[in-house]
Amino acid sequence: MSCLNQNQQPAPGTGINTAERMQPRAPGQVPPTMKNGRAVKDAGIAPEGLYRPDYRVMTPHMRSPEYVQMSTAAAITLGLVEGQMYNCSCTRCLNLLLTYPEGCRANCAYCGLARHREAERNYADRNFIRVDWPAAPMAEVVDRIAADVDNSPFHRMCISMITHPNSDEDTVTVLKTWTDRIDPDAIPISILSNPTTMTREDIVRLKDMGSDIFTVALDAASPAVFDRTRGKGVQSPHSWDTYWDAIHMARDIFGPQKFGAHLIVGMGETEREMMEVIQRLVDLGGHSHMFCFYPEKGSLMDHLPATPRDQWRRVQLARYLVDYCGVRVEHMTFGDDGRITDFGLPASELAAIVDAGIAFRTSGCPGKFAEDISACDRPYGDSPPSDIASYPFELRPADLRRVRHQLDMERPGETYVPGEELDLD
Ligand code: SF4
């Protein structure tokens, strides 16, 4: 038995994360001394190269476009920090996150970067999507990649904006710093945008400067969930209509297959609502990039359950069918509670797609292996490795048994022993 197996948390139960269950707690008050990064700015400590998040020391004053943060996986792959990732040697996407002492000015309930966290942790020390995000000078990041572009492990670079008054302009500068040294055809570029502050001209400029794909982190699959988790419900500035306006602008400017939206499954939407948004994106010519809700520590939803694995697998599979197999939501059937009861394909065809395993891997902008295999394979962003939601590697036979078990689609005579995939290590 592996150490992962010994530490395995009980899998979330079966069922659905209903709207009644998935209520964020209210944000608390932030002391004036902690607002807008004041503590960091008052201390005024100059950064010296790489900064590894450590909330026991005062965070240096770092700012984009000179500094960017990156996922722990990207920092390991780039050779900036040491570390190992379960069953993965690297990540194929270099996610660069804009960074400011003021942090993100939005307050999304599921997010570790949300504004209310000013009260307890400085901007660059906040966990985000389950991990720390080290910060480094942008010039050093570019130096490392430009030194050997042909042999770079990265299939894509992504600039992730946050909600900050400088983020539109600084995204342009970060992009130019990159394209001055690295051919965007060699490592294509994605933009994870901030629709709340962006104009059509901003989007056109990013396209003209060489970015390949434009994405919008819609995250919520219905207006009600959106408003509750990232709008007025949590004193956050975003609006459903503004986000959809950005998606439509991205379609016009970037063109078919070159735009997409992030969605998080299990924040209180029904499976039917989620599938209808996915179909809407495909009908526009775009893609969905899908994540499983995980209660981020320190967020306003950290007391809520991760998405039950049966709900997650149904939607994950159905999304793959709509995005890549020509199935439409109208071909599927749903129960009274919105649960998918039929995927709209003959059983043998469905079984072949399940057994291929690609439907259950991380989703995002494509890399260099195949259109339906994401470069964005940053591991364990939506689950611990002991209970994988999105697989950052090709599924092994035991992983497929686990997935079939969660979908209630086991082969005749097949048995899955919980945790057996962890005994492979
Ligand atoms: S806008 Fe993005 S980074 Fe900012 S709080 Fe919302 S989800 Fe987090």
Image (cartoon, helix red, strand yellow):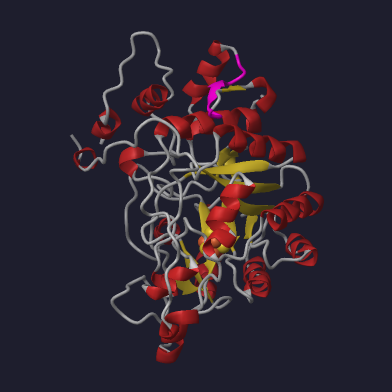
Left or right: residue 421 versus residue 257 is left
Magenta span covers which residues? Answer: 337-345
Q: Residue at x 36, y 58 (%)?
A: 297
Q: Residue at x 65, y 53 (%)?
A: 215
Magenta stretch encompasses residue 338:
yes
Residue 362 showing in the rendered view: yes
Q: Nearer the viewer, residue 262 or 78?
A: 262
Query: In x, y percent, where is residue 294?
Result: 41, 48
Q: Work out whether 337 lies above or below 362.
A: above
Q: Work out whether 388 lies above or below 212.
A: above
Residue 148 showing in the rendered view: no
Query: In x, y percent, where is residue 100?
Result: 52, 76
Q: Nearer the viewer, residue 219 or 269?
A: 269
Magenta stretch encompasses residue 368:
no
Q: Work out whether 256 lies above or below 64.
A: above
Query: In x, y percent, where is residue 186?
Result: 64, 54
Main SS, magenta residues: loop
